[in-house]
Image (cartoon, rainbow, N blue to C red):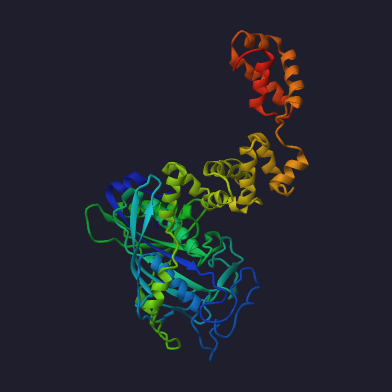
Amino acid sequence: MTTVTDLVPYEDALASFDPVMGLEVHVELGTRTKMFCGCATELGADPNSQVCPTCLGLPGALPVVNATGVESAVRIGLALHCEIAEWCRFARKNYFYPDMPKNFQTSQYDEPIAYNGYLDVQLEDGEVFRVEIERAHMEEDTGKSTHVGGATGRIHGASHSLLDYNRAGIPLIEIVTKPIVGAGERAPEVAKAYVAELRELIKALGVSEARMEMGQMRCDVNLSLRPSGEERFGTRSETKNVNSLRSVERAARYEIQRHAAVLSSGGAIVQETRHFHEDDGSTTSGRVKEEAEDYRYFPEPDLVPVAPPKEWVEELRGTLPELPRLRRNRLREEWGITQHEMQSVLNAGAVDLIVATTEAGADAPSARKWWMGELARRANEDGVDLAALPITPADVARVAALVAEGSLNDKLARQTIEGVLAGEGTPDEVVEKRGLKVVSDDGALGAAVDEAIAGNPAVADKIRGGKVAAAGALVGAVMKATRGQADAARVKELILERLGVEG
C-alpha cells in the first residue's frame, strides 16, 4: 500500500499514463417531503424526529413516489440534454449497513429516468470540454452515522455509533458520467469545472440549493490510469463523498499520482473505495469496491413503474432556464469584461448579486466594482460568502446612485457601506446619521480653500507659475480639512480661480 509520501510527481505521472475519470454526483432535492413517504426534510431537526414506518422500513409500510421528485429528475435530465425514458422503474439495491434501516436502498438500476446526455463545461482559459452523461436516476439518501470514541471520526477505532435516520429517504438524483478521456494533464481541472457547472445548473433549475458543505451535493471521483497509447482502461478507485470543488480537483490529482506510483513500481491497483482527507489532500483505503451483482438488484415490487407522458416532458422542457454557461457568456459580453474577469466574478459567487444590482438601477461597472472590491474584501475578512453579507443588491445600487449623482465620493461610499453592514440602516439613513454627504457648496468650501493656500505659499507660487499639477497638494489639504467630504473637482476649480490660473 502506498502512503501520502509514495507519490510520483504529477508531470512524471502524465508522461507515462493517461487518466480516465468517472464522476458520480449525488444531489439532494429540495422537496418538502421524502422520496417515498410524507416525512419532512428540514435540516437541523432533532435526531430521528422526521421518520415514519415507511422510511424506517417497518413491515407492512408501503412507499409512494414523490411527484415533485420525479418532476425534478425530468428537468435535470432535460437540462443535461438527456433522453427521458418513456417507461422506467425502481429497483432494490441490497446492502447491509446500519445507515439504511430497510437493509436496501430504493434506487434505479438498469432503467434510469434520464440517460445519454452531456454537459459542456468551460475551463478557466475559456476552453470548452464536453462531459458525456451516462445516466441520471432517482433514489433515496441514507441515514447519518456518527462514530464516537475514535480519533478519526470513522468507524475504525470507535467505541460505538449513533444513528440518525432523519436523512434516510430524502430524494436524491445521482448523475453518472461516461468515462472522461482525453483531458490529459487537465483532468483534475475538468473534474472541478464539471462539478462547478453542474452545481450552477442545479441551482438555476431551483431543484436544490446544492450546498456541498452541507452534503446537499457530493461527488464520488472514480479514477484509473492506462499506459499512454493503450485503449483498455486500468483498474479504478473510487474516492467517496468529496464535498467541495477544490477537494474534487485535489482528490483527482492525488489519485493520479498514487496510481502512477503503484503501477510504476510494478504493483497492481486494488478496486476499492477511498476516503479523502481535507487536511493534506490525501486519500486512504476504505473497503473493497463491490460490483453491481454484489448488490443483488431486483425490481421494486411495491412501486409501480414511472411513465412520464411525452406532452408533460415537453411542457417541462419549456420551463428550463437559460443554461448557466450561456448566461455567463451573454453577461460577459453585456458587461464588456474579459473571460478572466468573468471567472473571478464566478469564483467570488457574485454573478447573481451583480445582476440583481443592475436590475435595481446600477450600471454593470459600478455593481461589479462594489461587489468585487469593498464587499468581497469584507466577506473575505469575515470568512463568509458574499451573499451572506447583511447588504442587499438594492442597497448597493443606491450607494452607486449616490456616487453617480455626486452626493458621495468613493471614500464616503465605503463608509456608507460600512454603516449598512453594521446594521445602521439603509444607505440614505447611514449618510444622514453619519453626515457623509459630499460638500460642494462654494461658500462651505471657500474658507477651506483659502486656508490651504495660506498654509502652503510655496505650492501656491508653483501653481501661479504654471505648474497646475501642484494643485493636487492643495486639494489634498482641503480634503483632509473636510474629512474627505469635499467635492474634489470643485475644490480644484476654486483653487485655480483664487490663484488666477486657468485649468
Closer-to-camera residue (183/268): 183
**Residue 381 vertical placement versus 66 (above, below):** above
Q: Nearer the viewer, residue 3 or 71?
A: 71
User: Is 365 situated left or right of 119 in this image?
Assistant: right
Report whether residue 463 is seen: yes
Residue extending farthest to the bottom is 60
- At 47% from the left and 54% from the top, the residue drawn is 245
Image spot of residue 446 (x, y percent): 74, 22
Observer able to see residue 481: no
Of 407 and 112, the residue lying toward us = 407
Q: Is residue 433 left or right of residue 327?
A: right
Q: Where, quadrant-wise, is the C terminus in this rendering?
A: top right
- Between 369 and 273, the one lying in front of the other is 369
Instruction: Say which quarter of the image contains residue 84.
Output: bottom left
Q: Quadrant of the N terminus?
A: bottom left
- Above or below residue 496? Residue 353 is below
**Splitting the image into 4 quarters, where does residue 436 fall?**
top right
Residue 182 position within the rendered picture, expressed as x and y whole percent measured from the top left: 29, 54
Tell me where residue 384 appears, x and y as whole percent. Answer: 61, 51
Residue drawn at point x = 34 percent, y = 66 percent? 117
Q: Quadrant of residue 21?
A: bottom left
The number of discs equals 0
**Side (left or right) of 234 relative to 480:** left
Q: Position of residue 294 (x, y in %)?
A: 37, 77
Q: Residue at x 49, y 63 (%)?
A: 217
